[in-house]
Image (cartoon, rainbow, N blue to C red):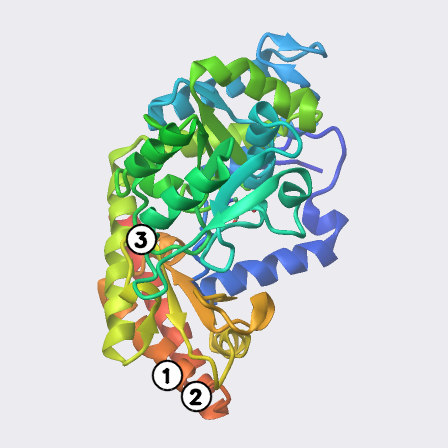
Amino acid sequence: MTRPARHPSPLPGSLAEVDPEVLATIHGEERRLRETIQLIPSENYPSQAVMEATGSVFTTKYAEGYPKRRYYQGCQWVDAVEELARKRACAVFGAEHANVQPHSGSTANMGAYLTSLTIGDTVMGMDLIAGGHLTHGSPVNFSAKLYRFVNYGVDPSTELIDYDNVRKVAHASRPKMIVVGATAYPRIFDWGIFREIADEVGALLLADIAHISGLIAGGAHPSPVPVADFCTTSTHKALRGPRGGMILCKSEWAERIDKAIMPGIQGGPLEHVIAAKAVMLHEAAQPAFHDYAHAIVSNAKVLAQSLLDEGLTLVTGGTDNHLMIIRLGDSGPTGKEVARAMERAGLVANANTVPGETRGAFQTSGVRVGTPAATTFGFGPDEFRTIGKLIAGIVRDPSNADVVKATAGAVRELCHAVEARREATHAHR
Ligand SMILES: Cc1ncc(COP(=O)(O)O)c(C=O)c1O
């Protein structure tokens, strides 16, 4: 039996031969990704190069420690690839130090907290209902179990971050750290003001850029790297890498950050994923990625305008980044009902809380949509205008089976047309 040169495993058998059941699920997922529109703002399609590195032989190797300081022998090539990833991360983001080992954005946050906080310390994070992440002090998360989180929120009328309120809460609670970043905030973060407030109360500043690190790498959102003590991120969102995490910090924190991740939290690093992060960072340094990041934002603005033209309401009235939240109102269909109807129509998004939420985090009164994955797929402004109209049709009448069916057909056609256009463009290169 011959094996592809890319998979030099001593064991015989391709996936099709060994486990057709699993292969069928992979083929199902590939079809889903080609025939429906991915509007979850934290998802993306990584490149073939990223996927090849993720599926590489580096999955074989135990490499506890860091390049040139490993507990196990045989680390020559994992050292080389991890060093590439670290150097590229510093170059892309202008950071003094990078740790590329966190298994996820959540673990990256845990690493930054363990590095600089003592159990019980006060930390300030964005209100979860207003868009903060679980690791920013949700009662069901380790963050709130280990630290005393206090919240800042958004202005109820503008739904924008209320910087006066941030300052007031900071002065009243004297946190050891201020965490800035969100899963569902459609506007720009003013890192300078957060730094000023942190300095006024002697707090550290952690910028959680999980959602926007791709925009920052491509110059489509201001960077917190010059002013934040720590920046944490997932690598699989707008940054378009493998599933994983990363921490950027000032050199003074380098040794403590590295120790917090390993041995503090994790054992052996996922070197195949780190290889893929290196590829992702190489891609993020190319001019095409700059264009991609700006296209994410311009497509989001087109989608937002299309939704507004259809009479829908958006949290903060629109977007400056890659996502927007449709506010559905307190009565009528919930976010969950609308997101389910959208899924049946091939428009894959998620229910999301809105500022002042009355229905809880599962049912919600909002739907979050974003453009990173669909922009990678090849959708442009014309398609996003159409997508806005299709979404609005479902939001207005989510239980109407005829509307759902007609929308599903339109979505499939749109996907096929864009895929054909993309392939024709690639063929001409
Ligand atoms: C702001 C923010 N921080 C952290 C995370 C956690 O990332 P992960 O899912 O990789 O643990 C997320 C995930 O959505 C996020 O939105």
Q: Residue 187 bears which disc, if any?
A: 3
Horizontal relation, residue 247 to residue 384: left or right: right
Amino acid residing under circle 2: Asp
Tell which tag, 3 or 2, sits nearer the viewer: 3
**How far is the residue under mark 3 from the one under mark 2?**
29 Å
Horizontal relation, residue 79 to residue 429: left or right: right
Q: Residue 393 bears which disc, if any?
A: 1
Residue that mark 2 sits on:
397
Amino acid residing under circle 3: Arg
Determine the residue positioned at 45% across, 45% down. 46
Q: Is residue 2 above or below residue 186?
A: above
Mark 3 burial class by Cα count in 10 Å: few <14, some 14-19, many 20+: some
Horizontal relation, residue 207 to residue 80: left or right: left
Q: Is residue 215 above or below residue 204?
A: below
Amino acid residing under circle 1: Gly
Q: Secondary structure at mark 1?
A: helix
Q: Quadrant of the C terminus?
A: top left
Q: In front here: 4 or 101? A: 101
Q: Earlier in the sequence, mark 3 or mark 2?
A: 3
Q: Is residue 188 above or below residue 79?
A: below
Q: Are marks 2 and 1 in contact (CB under 8 Å)?
A: yes
**How far is the residue under mark 3 from the one under mark 1?**
26 Å
Q: In front here: 414 or 166? A: 166
Res. 41 visible in picture: yes
Q: Secondary structure at mark 2?
A: loop
Please tell me how many numbered marks the rendered image carries: 3
